[in-house]
Image (spheres, grey):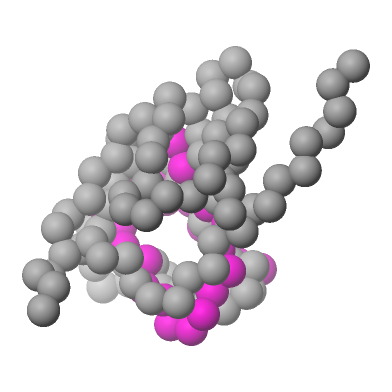
Amino acid sequence: MPKPIPVDVSEHALDIYKDFSIQPRRYQPGPPQRIDGMTVGILTLTSDAPHNGEMHPDGDEILHVISGKIRVMADSSPDEDLMMGPGDTCIVPRGEWHKVSILEETRLLHITAGPGGEHRPGPPST
């Protein structure tokens, strides 16, 4: 019988495939890798992403703040930023362009559908 597999979530995302099998995947620099399934990540964020928003066409995304503070901005409600703190959770609907701004160091859990995903280019680096 298989044994439970310990996973260091500070170094690995958890990929949940269509057959409901789960595999840890080490975080890599650059854009997130998308799978045909769901990815669960628990991240410590200290600065905003280098893009100007993202969109997930394959399913809704769950964001849950463990600690810290973020602002979630969505194209469908440009005048209604969602401020989130410890214990707050939101669902970003499939296809919604959104951006997360880090207001203070944040520990964030996300559950993101794939394999599709788009990012708007951010400002050029100086």
Q: Nearer the viewer, residue 121 or 54?
A: 121
The boundaries of the magenta stretch are 87-113
Q: Nearer the viewer, residue 94 or 109?
A: 109
Residue at 24%, 44% (x, y): give it.
118
Decide if residue 28 is on the left or right side of residue 106: left
Name the quadrant containing residue 42: bottom right
Which percent across, then down, holds residue 33? 38, 40
Residue at 31%, 33% (x, y): give it.
116
> Is 118 inside the magenta-drawn segment?
no
> Is 104 inside the magenta-drawn segment?
yes
Spot the residue most to the right. 1
Q: Measured along the vertical axis of the image, is residue 57 above or below residue 105?
A: above
Which percent across, then down, holds residue 46? 45, 77
Name the quadrant containing residue 36: top left
Where, quadrant-wise, is the N terminus in this rendering? top right
Where, quadrant-wise, is the C terminus in this rendering? bottom left
Is most of the magenta stretch helix, strand or loop? Answer: strand
Which percent across, then down, holds residue 89? 57, 60
Residue at 53%, 45% (x, y): give it.
26
Spot the residue most to the bottom. 104
Q: Measured along the vertical axis of the image, is residue 123 above or below residue 14?
A: below
Residue at 13%, 73% (x, y): give it.
125
Decide if residue 23 is on the left or right side of residue 122: right
* Residue 57 shows in the view: yes
Decide if residue 121 is on the left or right side of residue 58: left
Which percent across, then down, holds residue 71? 40, 73
* Residue 83 shows in the view: no
Number of labels in the image equals: 0
Q: Nearer the viewer, residue 73 or 47?
A: 47
Q: Measured along the vertical axis of the image, is residue 38 above or below residue 32?
A: above
